Image (cartoon, rainbow, N blue to C red):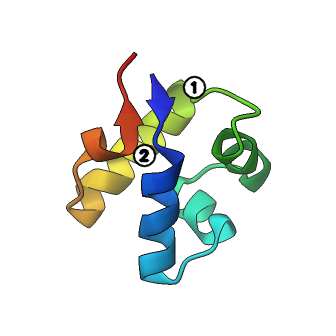
Amino acid sequence: MRLNVEKVGKMLKERGWSEVMFARKLNLDYSYVYRVMRGERGVGKKFLAGLMKFCEKEGLNFKDFIFLD
């Protein structure tokens, strides 16, 4: 499973959020989110769980933000 970085980036831009704000919304450390967004680290269980909760809270479709390999 991989993160659709372009889709996430577009969502952040539309909302006027920084990656720091996004990390806070996911309840994750910014350095972790930074590395995932740049492909330096794969998405892990913590990231996926945070993203899933975030999508549920914001009324977004989780599947829009990931690639199923």
Direction from residue 27 to residue 67 in the image, left or right: left
Check disc 2 and report the residue beneath it.
51
Q: Amino acid at mark 1?
A: Gly
Asked which quadrant contains residue 59, the reply is: bottom left
Q: Position of residue 6 (x, y in %)?
A: 50, 53
Image quadrant holding the N terminus, namely top left
Check disc 1 and report the residue beneath it.
44
Identify the residue at image location x=73%, y=50%. Answer: 34
In this rendering, is residue 63 above or below 58?
above
In this rendering, is residue 22 above or below 39?
below
Residue positioned most to the front: 6
Direction from residue 13 to residue 39 in the image, left or right: right
- The CA distance from mark 2 to mark 1 is 11 Å
In this rendering, is residue 18 above or below 41?
below
Direction from residue 63 to residue 9 in the image, left or right: right
Residue positioned most to the bottom: 16
Q: Secondary structure at mark 1?
A: loop
Identify the residue at image location x=43%, y=36%. Answer: 49
Q: Amino acid at mark 2?
A: Leu
Few, some or many residues within 10 Å of mark 2 (<14, 14–19, 20+): many
